[in-house]
Amino acid sequence: MPEPLLEIRGLTRSYRPRRSLLVRSPEVVALDDVSLSVGQGESLGLVGESGSGKTALTRAILRLEAPDAGQILYRGQDVARFGPRALRAFRARVQIVFQNPQAALNPRMTAEQIVTEPMLVHREIVGLERRGRRERAAELMAMVGLRTGHLRRFPHEFSGGQQQRIGIARALAAGPEMLLLDEPTSALDVSVQAQVLNLLIDLQDRLGLTYLFISHDLGVVRYLCDRVALIRHGRLIETGPAAQIFDAPQSAYARMLIAAAPELRQPG
Ligand SMILES: Nc1ncnc2c1ncn2[C@@H]1O[C@H](COP(=O)(O)OP(=O)(O)OP(=O)(O)O)[C@@H](O)[C@H]1O
Ligand SMILES: [Mg+2]
């Protein structure tokens, strides 16, 4: 097996809820000894109930929060040891797409500014001058199925599906290798979810991207992912090829999730 692109080893992170004078609430263990690897070009689905630690994992991967224990290796290198320059390069390579595009896009910026921003932040890697950035912005719009004319618009002038396309264009702007997709379609109207999912599949094929795909929707995960990891209360319960998880689940938790998913029932 080739070396994984991303490898997570024994990751543990707890949060101490804000203490009040009278009540001392217990610590929440958001991630409990999580180990996972994601191969280059693979789609790994991460599935779990609300509060199971999925977003906490993305924050730890991007080093937005330091873990209490454990390691994150990217191409075999320990992310915790990256200096400022290596960390910037890492963050250009691993980008995130959020659940709610409306909240994730700055309402005061045009689509062009939004999509161009990562090229400026990662100027030393992207290396484009003003004109090159404009061309790249237009290219990105085409890649996500929008038009160059859309670059002048503000987020509120787009539909939810279009806003998420801009979120995806921004995530692609610095030329990443991997996307962390944190419920990228669950805030969207059902009618456009499939279009955005198909766009993600198409982009993965064209650009050879690696995905960590977080979702509540097992139907979507089955459609999109090569492997699946099930998480509950911060612990991985079961990890395996999608076909195995869905057709021969090993854990009671997997069987429970599958039984509770109407989208997996065979029609007829
Ligand atoms: N900054 C924080 N302070 C305190 N507790 C936190 C913080 N961030 C997360 N938690 C707790 O950690 C646990 C995991 O949260 P997380 O956001 O990762 O869940 P999730 O799986 O992404 O859920 P959802 O599907 O609702 O997005 C939850 O119990 C949450 O309340
Ligand atoms: Mg979350």
Image (spheres, helix red, strand yellow):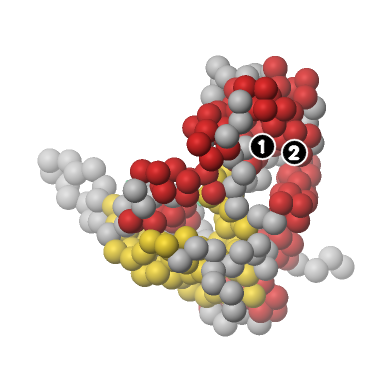
**Residue 39 visible in the displayed image:** yes
Element under label 1? helix
Q: In the image shown, does 79 or 86 lie closer to the viewer?
A: 86
Residue picked out by circle 1: 169
What is the number of the mark on residue 144? Answer: 2
For badge 2, the amino acid type reads Val
Q: Is residue 153 above or below residue 56?
A: above
- Give coordinates of residue 34: x percent, y percent: 41, 68
What is the number of the mark on residue 58? Answer: none
Q: Residue at x 74, y 22 (%)?
A: 150
- Give coordinates of residue 113: x percent, y percent: 60, 22
Is the residue marked by circle 1 packed among few (<14), some (14-19), or many (20+) residues within 10 Å? many
Q: Is residue 196 above or below residue 153?
A: below
Asked if disc 2 and disc 1 are in contact, CB closer than 8 Å, the reply is yes
For badge 1, the amino acid type reads Ala
Side of 255 relative to 82 (left or right): right
Q: Residue at x 71, y 51 (%)?
A: 207
Is the residue marked by circle 2 packed among few (<14), some (14-19), or many (20+) residues within 10 Å? many
Q: Quadrant of residue 141?
A: top right
- Give coordinates of residue 196: x percent, y percent: 73, 44
Q: Residue at x 80, y 68 (%)?
A: 266
Q: Quadrant of residue 133?
A: top right
- Give coordinates of residue 267: x percent, y percent: 84, 65
Q: Residue at x 57, y 82 (%)?
A: 250
For the C terminus, the quadrant is bottom right
How much space separates mark 2 and mark 1, taking CA atoms? 6 Å
Q: Is residue 254 above or below residue 62?
A: below
Side of 124 relative to 224 (left or right): left
